[in-house]
């Protein structure tokens, strides 16, 4: 791994902003988009359980429908790419079994040697109330969203994180509910329009002395 300087990281984080107006004529090259997809899936999650599904919506007709249930926000149709971060609802013992089987496969270790890990995870997760479990899954998604936004910024790709949409309607349109998932957040990505007024605005953050406490 070739380290990236923190100056470069901070420059990217200062350069990025929640893009309000994308240039609809500019598309992210396929290889770059593929790398951003990988960046999401490389996000860490509690127990490594990855309680998510990332739905990349390319169909313009579906994007038009989603815009209608996203308060008309233009990013949904105008950005080069769009991904819906959906959480697993009611994670169950089968989901955990699938993860354990994947560990055995990828790390080439006997499934039986992971039995105590599986039992521990099942005990920890399935004892929770559905609301807790779903909130837990939602938290994991935001780590993936952060990975996506950071990777995009470092690659000079504009993005907008979005929660301004009607989640149950997304679930219906994308048939997520049938599959046991729930739309939680969206990221649109592409290239800023030359006249996006938000691009030139100063970044608003509390001072570090207000946000960070050293003990
Ligand atoms: C979880 C989340 C949801 C957001 N939802 C929307 C949204 O629906 N539409 C939008 O234009 N911006 C949305 N934003 C962008 C924020 O308003 C923006 O990130 C914040 O004001 C900080 O500005 P900056 O990202 O440009 O630095 C969202 C941001 C986050 C992190």
Image (cartoon, rainbow, N blue to C red):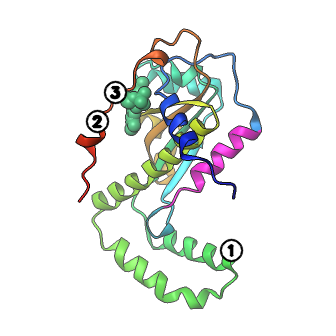
According to the image, label 1 marks what residue? 106
Residue on which the image places disc 2: 207
Q: Which contiguous range is marked in magenta?
A: 31-44
Q: Nearer the observer, disc 1 or disc 2?
A: 2
Q: CA distance from mark 2 to mark 3?
A: 9 Å
Residue 126 coordinates in the image, percent (x, y):
36, 72
The N terminus lies in quadrant: bottom right
Q: Whole-percent x and y of residue 76?
A: 53, 25
Whether label 1 touches label 2, CB < 8 Å: no
The residue at the point 50 percent across, 54 percent down is 52
Can residue 20 be found in the magenta stretch? Answer: no
Q: On the image, numbered disc 3 is attached to which residue?
A: 204
Report the residue at 57% width, 26% height from top. 63
Circle 3 packing at 10 Å, graded few (<14), some (14-19), many (20+), is few
Q: CA distance from mark 1 to mark 3?
A: 43 Å
Asked if residue 202 can be seen in this view, the reply is yes
Magenta-highlighted stretch: main secondary structure? Answer: helix
Specify the quadrant that holds the C terminus.
Answer: bottom left
């Amino acid at each position: 791994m070739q380290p990236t300087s923190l100056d470069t990281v901070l420059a990217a984080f200062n350069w990025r902003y929640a893009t309000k107006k994308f240039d609809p004529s500019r598309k992210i090259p396929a290889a770059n988009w593929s790398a951003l997809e990988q960046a999401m899936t490389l996000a860490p999650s509690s127990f490594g359980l990855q309680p998510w599904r990332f739905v990349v919506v390319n169909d313009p007709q579906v994007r038009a429908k989603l815009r209608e249930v996203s308060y008309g926000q233009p990013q949904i149709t105008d950005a080069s790419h769009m991904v819906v971060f959906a959480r697993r609802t009611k994670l169950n013992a089968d989901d955990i079994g699938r993860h354990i089987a994947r560990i055995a496969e990828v790390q080439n270790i006997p499934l039986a040697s992971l039995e105590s890990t599986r039992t521990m995870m099942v005990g920890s997760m399935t004892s929770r109330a559905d609301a807790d479990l779903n909130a837990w899954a939602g938290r994991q998604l935001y780590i993936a969203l952060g990975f996506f936004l950071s990777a995009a910024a470092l690659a000079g790709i504009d993005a907008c994180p979005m929660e301004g949409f009607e989640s149950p309607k997304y679930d219906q349109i994308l048939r997520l509910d049938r599959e046991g998932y729930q739309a939680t957040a969206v990221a649109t990505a592409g290239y800023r329009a030359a006249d996006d007024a938000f691009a030139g605005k100063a970044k608003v953050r509390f001072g570090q002395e207000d946000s960070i406490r050293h003990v």
